[in-house]
Amino acid sequence: MVKICCIGAGYVGGPTMAVIALKCPAIEVAVVDISVSRINAWNSDQLPIYEPGLDAVVKECRGRNLFFSTDVEKHVQEADIVFVSVNTPTKTRGLGAGKAADLTYWESAARMIADVSKSDKIVVEKSTVPVKTAEAIEKILTHNSKGIKYQILSNPEFLAEGTAIQDLFHPDRVLIGGRETPGGQKAVQALKDVYAHWVPEDRILTTNLWSAELSKLAANAFLAQRISSVNAMSALCEATGADVTQVSYAVGKDSRIGPKFLNASVGFGGSCFQKDILNLVYICECNGLPEVAEYWKQVIKINDYQKSRFVNRVVSSMFNTVSNKKVAILGFAFKKDTGDTRETPAIDVCKGLLGDKARLSIYDPQVTEDQIQRDLTMNKFDWDHPVHLQPMSPTTVKQVSVVWDAYEAVKDAHGLCILTEWDEFKTLDFQRIYDNMQKPAFVFDGRNIVDAEKLRDIGFIVYSIGKPLDAWLKDMPAVA
Ligand code: NAD
Ligand code: UDX
């Protein structure tokens, strides 16, 4: 029986390994982590992450050929294939701080593999890493090898949160990069054989190591760039009376462009896009390519601009001050169908409104009060360092209350901001909401999910990203 061990039981390690275990009953899969609380949660009925369809997959395999454990060394020692899916956050200090990937967690995992291994292993980079990381890992392993042979593969993960299980069941592609030596190609084939249990062969792409590593950064940069492009257009739409939904539909109809990932929003969030683009920028700078670095940096700049533009719109519409006004925040997760708040645009929007002394009442169906308080008090880039290493901040933001009901959040509020596109927000009773709000009542739709005309008929003043402005908003211009 082939044995797989995955180091890192997070948003990637957990779901990917659960799906491998489901699709390959003859393979034993152990997912290990240094976080005791995470592993306990994986072994309980309350999984540590919310992901549609994940519960069923885990229930079917756990205890059969899928195991979650904190005994990292034992499972690494026994495995033929070791996936490394630890976090690779942005460095917060030292060389490259604020841009470069922090490979501390990766390196300590690699050193531990070298320490405990007693048999040859294939080591798979599942984490997103800077191009050429495999070379560094190879050096750590071979300089400590005690005669053991290692093959390093790059197998970046392309799943998106909220749709992870479907993405893993039906991937657009699986990418495997390896050394172009007989040993390297044998390892590539071994990993191909795992995926071939359910992924059609023509969707399993093989490349050299550096292409696989770089393709992951490139794919995220291209996706984020589409969002920044449409968000840049949304600002121009508001200035000219064009409608961004109509513009992106017309643009996306060009088969060379395609319709996906063209939804204007309050800004993209999530643990990957910003981190990976900053990483790409840093690599370009280190390779003497400042023009290329500058090009990709702009994707982040537009994203920051979009978030601050939204805050400015809220404040300027409400007579240029939200001081002591209650503002309801519907949605805090970075997208629907996840409880993940890493780099969510809601953090910047809330901090912006708090900076203008608003009182916030926040509701998200999947995010806890502790998490929201932690996010609003944490320093930039600290979030991606393992949760168990982050003490709960002793301070809480007093102007913030977190409630478990949308109607409670909006009661007596002056304004309401929609920051996540949860389906349940589309079917709220907006007449009831209007009746319970201060007047004039404002809706700021950061996801373009409400029917603005219907809400205007009720009496709301409505701002939708990239849509023609009502007279009220035209009279209260926001300066970004
Ligand atoms: P995560 O923070 O949810 O999980 C990482 C886990 O690794 C944590 O539970 C942490 O405790 C554990 N860990 C860290 N060092 C360890 C060590 N030495 N030994 C054992 N466990 C250790 O992160 P994630 O979202 O799963 O992302 C993991 C990687 O995958 C990152 O490089 C990320 O960029 C990449 N990625 C993420 C996504 C996504 O949607 N989240 C998608 C594709 C790729
Ligand atoms: C992303 C990539 O899609 C995935 O391939 C990679 O493996 C990890 O990073 P994820 O961050 O989980 O996945 O979600 P994604 O669906 O890409 O959304 C990222 C952000 O962009 C969210 O905040 C989302 O709301 C926003 N977004 C997405 C838009 O604002 N407009 C869009 O059209 C699409």
Image (cartoon, helix red, strand yellow):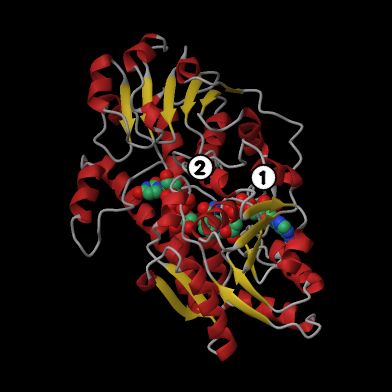
**Vertical side of 52 occupied by 417: above or below:** above
Q: Is residue 309 in view from this perspective?
A: yes
Q: Is residue 183 left or right of residue 264?
A: right
**Vertical side of 165 occupied by 82: above or below:** below
Q: Residue at x 46, y 50 (%)?
A: 165
Q: Mark 1 touching mark 2, by CB under 8 A?
A: no
Q: Which residue is mark 1?
A: 379
User: Which residue of the protein is positioned furthest toward the bottom in this rendering?
Assistant: 182
Task: Place residue 391 in its image quadrant.
Answer: top right
Question: Residue 104: x and y, percent?
Answer: 72, 63
The N terminus lies in quadrant: bottom right
Ranked by sequence position, the earlier of labels 1 and 2 is 2
Q: Which residue is mark 2?
A: 56
Q: How many marks?
A: 2
Q: Amino acid at mark 1?
A: Asn
The C terminus lies in quadrant: top left
